[in-house]
Image (cartoon, helix red, strand yellow):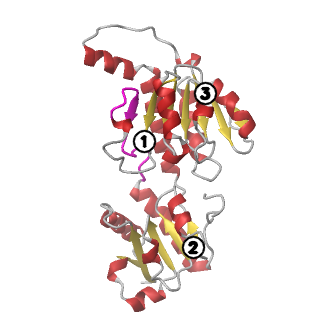
Amino acid sequence: MSGCLPLVCAPGYAFAEPWRAALQAALPEERIVDLAALDARARADCEMAIVANPDPRELATLGRLQWVHSVWAGVERLVADLQDSPVQIVRLVDPQLAETMAEAVLAWTLYLHRDMPRYARQQAAGIWRAHDYVPPQRKTVALLGLGELGAASAAKLRAAGFQVSGWSRSRKAVAGVQCFAGAEELPALLAGADIVVCLLPLTPETEGMLDAAALAHLRPGAALINFARGAIVDDAGLRAALDAQQLAHAVLDVFQTEPLPPAQWQWQHPQVTLLPHISAPTNRATAAAIVAANVRRWRATGALPAVVDKQRRY
């Protein structure tokens, strides 16, 4: 075997062993072990670790640690924990993740487009009433974020017939998408949207970006899907927009505190569909294969995969 690679997960993480097994199957020449199985001497020799929201105090026991490979795409917590550390961070970049997210974007866009929340309310009230059908060609879906996830989502939405616009921090060109860029163009994107889908990374610039002022640019009756990070949407501003009918509905898959505490208003709000962070679960088999390829390349050449910019947080 080439060496010993620790898998360092969040305390109590339910899928630690399935991840270890998937990684071991993809890297048979390595020994993938839970960090707890390593003594102090073995930990001192580890230069690399595979991680899933690890406790930074556990990473600190790896004296020669040079880099960590996250099994997830979102690494803002890891970046915060290692901000002042020389340890480099590699996040998961998996084409399968983009496809899974695009599927979720299309599914929940259709849920809103076909008025599912209204028909659910009618069922609860015992009301039998049909409403006019509006074809997707007359609806604009605005994507906040035009990276891998946004581009894949745009393709599925366009194939379903929707008009698609998109926003990014810097100018991008995506086939068939009306592209907006920079803070000065965000209001115009929001004003033209029927459904807004947030796919942005959490950075200092995007934290709290969808606040009351931003949501006020939406046309009355618009809807929001947040599949990014909870902190991008200001909770108070969102609730006010929903209560005022500025927003007709919000599909929320991410929250500032997860699991969402039972007392939080989103659980009971009639205009909120709440999901337990399931929009784009990582595929362990494809993710493990990508991690394996990166580890083998590093073992052979010493070259790291593309690392996260800790200032930008992605």
Q: How many marks?
A: 3
Numbered badge on residue 21: none
Instruction: Give the left or right position of residue 182, taking residue 298 as reference.
Output: right
Outermost residue to the bottom: 41
- Of the 4 image quadrants, the one containing the C terminus is bottom right
Give SS at disc 1. Answer: loop
Q: Which residue occupies the foreground of this view, 108 or 244? A: 244
Q: Amino acid at mark 3?
A: Ala
Question: Residue 33 in the image: x percent, y percent?
Answer: 36, 77
* Crowding near the residue tagged with mark 1, few <14, some 14–19, many ≥20 C-alpha atoms within 10 Å: some
Question: Residue 91 in the image: x percent, y percent?
Answer: 54, 61
Which of the two discs, 3 and 1, labels the residue nearer the N terminus?
3
Q: Using the rendered view, name the quadrant where residue 16 is placed.
A: bottom left
Q: Alpha carbon of mark 2 to alpha carbon of mark 1: how far?
A: 35 Å
Find disc 2 in the rendering and name its residue: 297
Find disc 1 in the rendering and name its residue: 253
Give SS at disc 2. Answer: helix
* Crowding near the residue tagged with mark 3, few <14, some 14–19, many ≥20 C-alpha atoms within 10 Å: some
Q: Residue at x 51, y 45 (%)?
A: 228
Magenta segment main secondary structure: loop
Magenta stretch holds residue 207? no
Instruction: Give the left or right position of residue 235, taking residue 272 as reference.
Output: right
What span is colored magenta in the figure?
Answer: 268-282
Please tell me whether mark 2 or mark 3 is closer to you in this view.
3
Q: Alpha carbon of mark 3 to alpha carbon of mark 1: how far?
A: 22 Å
* Residue 228 seen in this snapshot: yes
Q: Residue at x 32, y 21 (%)?
A: 120
Question: Residue 1 in the image: x percent, y percent?
Answer: 41, 84
Q: Residue at x 56, y 40 (%)?
A: 152
Find disc 3 in the rendering and name its residue: 216
